[in-house]
Image: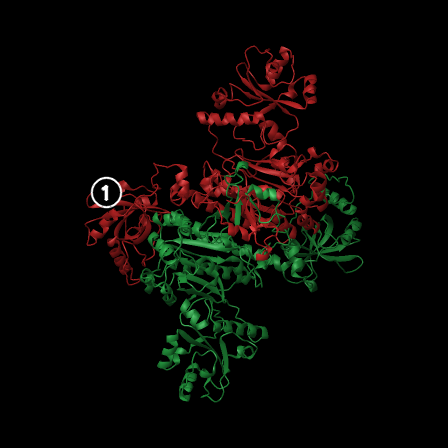
Chain colours: A green, B red
Amino acid sequence: MRRAFSAVKRLVAHSGRLAPRVVSAKSNLVLPAPFPPRTHTCGELTADHAGVRVVLAGWLLPERKVSKAMSFFPIKDSHGTTQLVVRRKRDSCAGDLAALSDIPVESTVLIEGEVRVRPQSSRRGDGTGDIEVDVSDFVLLNPADRHLPFVPSDEHCLVNEELRAEFRHLDLRRAALTNNIKKRSIVSRVIRDTLHHEGFLEVETPLLLKSSPEGAREFLVPSRVGRSAHEADMHPLFYSLPQSPQQPKQLLICSGAVDKYFQIAKCFRDEDGRRDRQPEFTQIDLEMAYVSWGPPLHQTGSQALNWQIGGHEVRTVVESLIRNIWQQVENVALPSSFTVMTYAEAMSSYGSDKPDTRFPLKIVNVSSLLPDQHRARLDGAGVTLDALVIRQSDCQPFLRANDGELEEPGVDRIIITTDNESNWLDNCRVMPFDIPLAAEKYAAINRVLGMNPGDCIWISQRRSAIEGGSTALGRVRIRLAEMAEKLGDYSPPITPHFLWVTEFPLFTRADPDKDFLAHGRWSSTHHPFTAPMWQDIEAMYAGRIGQVRGQHYDLVLNGVEIGGGSVRVHDAAMQDYIFTQVLQLTKSEKATFEHLLHALRCGAPPHGGIAIGFDRLMSILCKTASIRDVIAFPKTGAGTDPLLKSPATVAADVLRHYGIQPVHKS
Amino acid sequence: MRRAFSAVKRLVAHSGRLAPRVVSAKSNLVLPAPFPPRTHTCGELTADHAGVRVVLAGWLLPERKVSKAMSFFPIKDSHGTTQLVVRRKRDSCAGDLAALSDIPVESTVLIEGEVRVRPQSSRRGDGTGDIEVDVSDFVLLNPADRHLPFVPSDEHCLVNEELRAEFRHLDLRRAALTNNIKKRSIVSRVIRDTLHHEGFLEVETPLLLKSSPEGAREFLVPSRVGRSAHEADMHPLFYSLPQSPQQPKQLLICSGAVDKYFQIAKCFRDEDGRRDRQPEFTQIDLEMAYVSWGPPLHQTGSQALNWQIGGHEVRTVVESLIRNIWQQVENVALPSSFTVMTYAEAMSSYGSDKPDTRFPLKIVNVSSLLPDQHRARLDGAGVTLDALVIRQSDCQPFLRANDGELEEPGVDRIIITTDNESNWLDNCRVMPFDIPLAAEKYAAINRVLGMNPGDCIWISQRRSAIEGGSTALGRVRIRLAEMAEKLGDYSPPITPHFLWVTEFPLFTRADPDKDFLAHGRWSSTHHPFTAPMWQDIEAMYAGRIGQVRGQHYDLVLNGVEIGGGSVRVHDAAMQDYIFTQVLQLTKSEKATFEHLLHALRCGAPPHGGIAIGFDRLMSILCKTASIRDVIAFPKTGAGTDPLLKSPATVAADVLRHYGIQPVHKS
C-alpha cells in the first residue's frame, strides 16, 4: 500500500495537475488523493491508438504470469476489458509495478501506459483484442476485500441466486447483467426517440394518487395531511400508489393540453407473490386524442380487414415503435403490420387469448362436424366439442411430447386405431352423452380432420360461450410445445411473432380474481373505461351485457401478452350508464370516478391508448428467464429486497405521526 | 343533436370508410360512431395548403357572426387554432351547418372543409393566421356542458386558484399551462439527448425502498410481505419512498455495471407544508465513476482555478447540459464555463450560500479595516463586523428601496452625515463595545468604503465562523432587490446568472432542521457520503471536524439553488470513520448503511454526482411563480389533490391486511 502512495505521488507529478500530498494516515488506509482523469475507457482502444500514452481506470482481474519478468493483467470497466502488460525490470519503477501482483482482484486501479499492437499471432481482431497497454505507472484507487462473497468476473462459477441477490451490487458487475442494464437504456432511448418523432409529449403523472375501491390491491401511503399534535383522534388519510396512470392520462387527454401523451411510467401492484411479478414495475404508457377507425378501407392493406375496432392510430404507432426497437436493437426487420385476430378466433383455434402462433397446431371444432341432431343436443347443453389432432405425418416435433405423461383435467387423449369405425367419440370420457355414429360417419369426420390410423386426438368439451383466458385444449397445446422444446425436438423460430388480439368481451362474470370486488355483479374484463364496439352499443343499452365486445386490443409476442389498451368511453352519459346500470356500482364506488365523468362532460375528445410492459419486453429482448434480470435492483418473488433489506419495521412513534399503529402492539 | 347524427352519417359516407349506423339511443345521447381520422392538426395549416380538403378535430371556441349568412368559429387543439368559416346558404347542408351555432363552446367537433387563403387585409402572417377553412360538413364528437365551472379559452377571466385546482383537467386547457407542459417535455428530451450523447445510461432505481433512521421525513408504504391471516400479531413491515435515489445510484456505480448513470427520477419528501414544495418532485439525477481533478491546470482556462475540489467531470457535463437547454429552448448562448465561488466567499461577500449575483451590491468586512487592537477585541469575542454600503453615486436602482421600511433584526442602518467624524460605528446598536475612533480614522475607513456624506451603511455583527445559509446582511441585500423590483427601479437582467458554490463545511451543528436526528451530535451538511476535500482529510482524522470542507458543489441560478452534488467517499474505512467517529451513529443507525459500506469494500471506484431540481428549473424556464404551474397534476401547498381528492380515508379492514389500524378507532 505504501508503494501505491508513492505511485500516487509520481503519477500526480507526471500529470502536473497538483503537487502531491500524502496524508499522514492512521493505520494502513489508502486515502483519496488527487489523480488525473482517465483518457480512454477499457473498451475503446484499438490498433489505431498504437504508441499513444493513455490513462485507464478499472477493475483489476486475475494476473497471468508469462515469465518472471512479465505478467498480463486484464483491466475491466463497464465498456470492456483491456490487457495490461507489466514488465518488472524495465525501468526504475520496477519495484512499484511488481506491487500490482499484491493487489486483490476486483480492486480499482488507475494505470498509465503506452498502447502497443499485439504480435500478429495473439490478436483477437475485435477492438481491444488487437492491443495491449504497456504499464509504466499505476495508482491503487480502492482495494477490494480479499474475501468477496463471490467473484463476479468468474463466469464459470455462478453462485446461488440468494447470495447474488443479497450482494446485488457485486452481481451487477457480471457482464450478463451489465449488458441487460445497458440494453434497457438503449431500448428506452429508441422508445422515446420514436414517440417524440411521432409527435408525442412525455408527461409525468402523480404517484401519490387516490386510493380507490380496489384499494386492497394498491399500495397505500399514510399521510400527515391536516394532522397536528392535537388531532391524534383524526381519521388517518392515505394516498395510494398507481397500478397504472390510467386516470391521470385520460384526464390529461380530456384536458386537451396534450394530443399524444406518453410516459415510461413506474406502476405498483400489491399482489400476493406471483411468480416473476414485481411489486413495482415499468410500463410504456401512451394515450392519443381523436383516435379513429383509420383511413377508408381502399387505402389500407388487407391487414386492416380484421381490425374492426377504433384506435387505428394507436395500432399504427405501436407497430412502428416495436419495429424500430427490433430494427435498431436486434437488427431484425418486422413486417409492416402485425396479424390481427379476434378474441373469439384466438380462443377457438388456439384455446388462448394470447396464442403462441409460432407453431401451427390448431384446435378444431368437432361439434360442427357432427350430424345435425347431435350438434343440436350439444348446443342445447351449451357445450362445444374441441379437438387437437397430432398427426404422425405433420406433427414431427410434437410426437415424442405427445407420447409423454401429459394430462389435463377434462381432456381425453385417444389414439385412433386402424379400426376407423371404433366408436372413439363415444368412448371418450368428456362426452356428455353417447353418440352412436355409423362407421362411415366416423370415416368422414376423420377425413375432414385429416386423421389416419395411429394419429392421436385430444378431445375436450367446453362451454360454447367463450370466456376467460384459456381452454383445456389450449393448455395442452402449450404444454406439448414446452415438452417438445425440453426434449430438443422443437425450437421456437428466432423471428418474433407479434399478434393483435381484439374484440374481447367487454364485461365478464368469469374472472374469479375480480369477484372479490364484483360480488356477483358484472365486472369489466379490462377496466370500466373501455368503449364498447359501436356495433354492440345497442346490445349494451338493451341489457344484453354478455354479448358486448369492447374496443380493446392486446399485443401478444410469442404467446406472451406484452401490452394491452383500448379506445375509451368519451361520452359521459355512456360512462355513467356503464358505472350505474351495467356494473351497478354503489354511490361510494362511483364517487371515485366523479372527476373523470366531469372531464368527459367538458368536451373530452374521443381517445384511446395502450400500456406495454417494459420489464417483460426487456426480458424477451435480453432472453432472460426472469424479469429480475433486466431490473437493476429487483425485489424477490416474495416482495423483499435482500440488498437494501426492505420492507422493515418502523418505530411506533413514527407511525403515530400518521395516526396509525400496529394492530397488536408488541 | 339530431342534426349532428345526420352529419355523422354524411361524413362517414363521404369518407367511404364504413357504412354509417345510427344507434337507437335512449334520450338525447350522442353515441360514438365511426368517424374518419383528422388529416391535419389545428396548428398546421398555412397558405401552402390552399385548396386542400382537410378534416380537423378540436374544441369549438365562441362564434363570431359576420353576417346572417356567415360566421367565424375558431377551432382549437393542443397544436394551435384555426379559423373556420361557415357559410349558411351555400349548399344543401346549410341547415346542418347552422347547427354549429347551437353547439356549446369547448365541445369537440370534427369538421371537413377546404383551406382558403384569407384576404390580404386579414392575414396575420403566422401560420394558421394566413388561412381559414371553409366548412362543408361537421360532426359533433362530444358536447361540453353549457355550464362549465369556467371557460379556459377566456384569457380575460382567470378564476381563483382553488377552483382551477379542483378542475385541473379544464385549467390545463388554458394555453399558458399547455405551453408549460409542452416545454417540460421538450426540456426533458434535451436532457436525455445530451446525457446519452455524453455516454450516460438511464437506469431506473427502486421507489419501494428501505425506511431509514430519517423515517419521519420519508413517506412509508405498508407492506403485506410475509403476512398471512394467521399472523395478525406480526409486526407490520414498511417500504419507504426515496427522498432521492442516492443510495441506489451509488450502489449502481460501485457495481461497475454503469460508468455514467442518469435518471429523471421521482422523489418524495414528507415535509410539513413549505411554500411551493411538492410531496413528490422530479430531479435530474446523475452519477459518474472515476471523477477526477481534471486535466493539468495549464490545459484548462482560468475558470478552473477556483474549482479546487474533485468532480471535474460532473461540472463539465452539467455545464454542457445547461448550455444545451438554454441554447435549444431559449436560444440563449451561455458562457463556456460558469463562475465558481467558495462557500466562504459567497457568505462573506453576499451573505448567502446561493448568492444572487445579478446585481452588484457586495458586503464588506469592516473588522479588517479597524485598528489592530479593536479587531483583536472583536476576534476575541468571535464576531466579525459586516457592512453593506448604499452609495448615492452608484446604487441608483436601490436608493428608493433603501429609504423604505426595511428592517432586519441585528442590523443597523446608518446615514453618514456631512460630519464625517460622527462616531457612527460606536453609535450603532449592533456593536459589542464602544470604539472611540479618531475622526481621521473614520475618514480613512469611509474612504476605503467609498462612502460620502449622505450615503447609507447597513452594519451587522455575525459569528466569525461562517455557518448556515445566509447572514442578516445577506437577507437585507435580497430584500433591497425585491423592493427595488417592486418599485420598478430595478429589473433583473434577462440573461441567467449561473454560479457554482463549492467548499461547503462538511459537517455542521448549526442546522436546526437536522437536530431532531442529530441530538447535539455533528450532522452532515448535505449527506454523510460526501467526501472531504483532500486538503482537509488530516484535520478530519485529527478531530478538527468544524474545519473540514467537503467536495460539495451547489449550482445556483439567479440566486436560486437548482442543484447540488458532491464527490462521494469511496474508501470504506473513511466512510466508516465518518459514520462512527464523526457522526457518532448508533449501531442501529449505522446498520442501514451496511450494504453501502460493503459495496465500497468491493473495489468501488471514486465517484461523484449531482441532482438538479427539474420542477424548479422548469418553473424558471417557464417564468412561472409556482412549480405547480409546470406539473400536470400538482398537489396544493397542504399536500392535497383537489382534483383526485387525495389523500383519503381507507376502510379499516383494508388497513388490517397490513397489520395497522388507526390510533383511535372511531
Q: Is residue B400 rendered to the left or right of residue B517?
A: left
Give the residue drawn at x 67%, y 55%.
A76
Instruction: Tell me the kind of residue under disc 1.
Output: Lys
Placement of A422 over or under A175, stated as above or below? below
Residue A293 placed where, x, y %?
35, 60
Location of residue A488 in the rendering, given as x and y in whole percent from the top left corner: 58, 75
Between B223 and B127, which is closer to the camera in this rendering?
B223
Identify the residue shown where x is 49% and y is 23%: B398
Q: Judge whether residue B365 can be spotted in this image.
A: yes
Please identify the quarter of the rendering in which residue A106 is found: bottom right
Label 1: chain? Answer: B
B240 relative position to A320: left or right: right
Q: Who's the residue at 43% across and 42% down the image?
A: B642
Q: Nearer the viewer, residue A260 or A385?
A: A385
Q: Position of residue B250 (x, y in %)?
A: 63, 48
Number of disc labels: 1
- The kind of secondary structure element at disc 1 is strand
